[in-house]
Amino acid sequence: MLICGLNKTTLLDYPGKVAATVFTGGCNFRCPFCHNKDLLLHPAEYASHTNEDVFAHLKKRAGILQGVCVTGGEPTMQKDLPDFLAKCKDLGYAVKLDTNGTNPEMMKMLYMEGLIDYVAMDIKSGLSDYAKVAGLIDDHAQTLLSNIKESVRFLMEDTRENTDPSVFRSDFDFEFRTTVVKELHNAAAFEEIADWIAGAPHYFLQSYKDSDGVLTPGLSACSKEELESFADIVRGRVPSVELRGVD
């Protein structure tokens, strides 16, 4: 895989577990608020670790680390992701996948093969505004949006309601999350999101953080009060709605 970073120990990236986080390069989105622009625009220049480097670290930290979080960029763009995750599982680790949901077939395969235990999928905005917020301006935007809707459907329906015992995995969990940017989100967006993901087990509103690595400078965070007002819109249709990254 194209690995552009390794956080050797984190208590934040994998809920309830001490984990290592692997950053893959490349993404098919151009979200203006992305804080990993180098991983999007010039990923090959930032390749910093090999698969073997990661596996050596996981072996060394066995008994201390409990999970591996694979994030990006967009990890499902890596064709050898299944082999990489299979090795993580062979080493005894739980695996969390961070994804934008544009590759539902990869997600389904990883789920069916037992290679992922937790998925955190980004919900960039309501569907009517999705392409703009995700920076999708080319001819593939509608295809990607269709894929995103299929990923949500799969997580919401197949993993929760499929009655085939060979498919359903009671040990699997997932969350949806939205990074909230003052210039890009409003109450109407969260009304749409609430309707779209109603019944999801976990939804997080993450506060935008400005940094030198952001793709489009000049954006700003909402206040805690604004974030709470957006969270309140979703509450009642999603059992667990929380804020992240809020002081």
Image: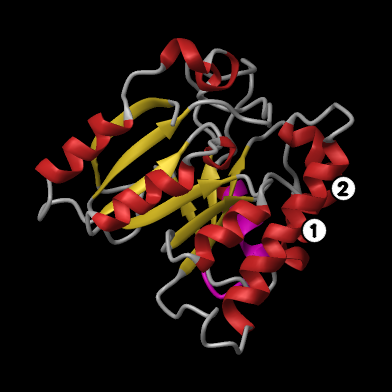
Q: Are marks 2 and 1 in contact (CB under 8 Å)?
A: yes
Mark 1 burial class by Cα count in 10 Å: few <14, some 14-19, many 20+: some
30 lies left or right of 99: right
Residue 231 quadrant:
bottom right
Apparent side of residue 75 relative to residue 65 in the rendered image (left or right): right
Classify residue 42 by image quadrant. top right
Give the percent coordinates (x, y) of residue 52: 26, 32
75 in the magenta segment: no
Residue denoted by label 2: 128
Mark 1 belongs to which amino acid? Glu
> Residue 241, can we see it?
no
Q: Which residue is mark 1?
A: 192
The crowding category of the residue bearing disc 2, from other C-alpha atoms within 10 Å (few below 14, some 14 to 19, many at least 20), is few
Residue at 46% x, 40% y is 71
Does residue 12 appear left or right of residue 156 in this picture?
left
**Total labels drawn:** 2
Give percent across and percent down for residue 243. 49, 53
Q: Position of residue 26 (x, y in %)?
A: 57, 26
Residue 210, compared with residue 15, is above or below; it is above
Q: Which quadrant does the C terminus fall into?
A: top left
Magenta stretch contains residue 239? yes
Residue 236's tag is none
Instruction: Say what secondary structure mark 2 lies in.
Output: helix
Residue 179 visible within the image: yes
| Amino acid carrying mark 2 in the image | Ser
146 versus 223 height, above or below: below
Comes first in the chain, label 2 or label 1: 2
Magenta range: 226-241
Q: Position of residue 192 (x, y in %)?
A: 79, 58
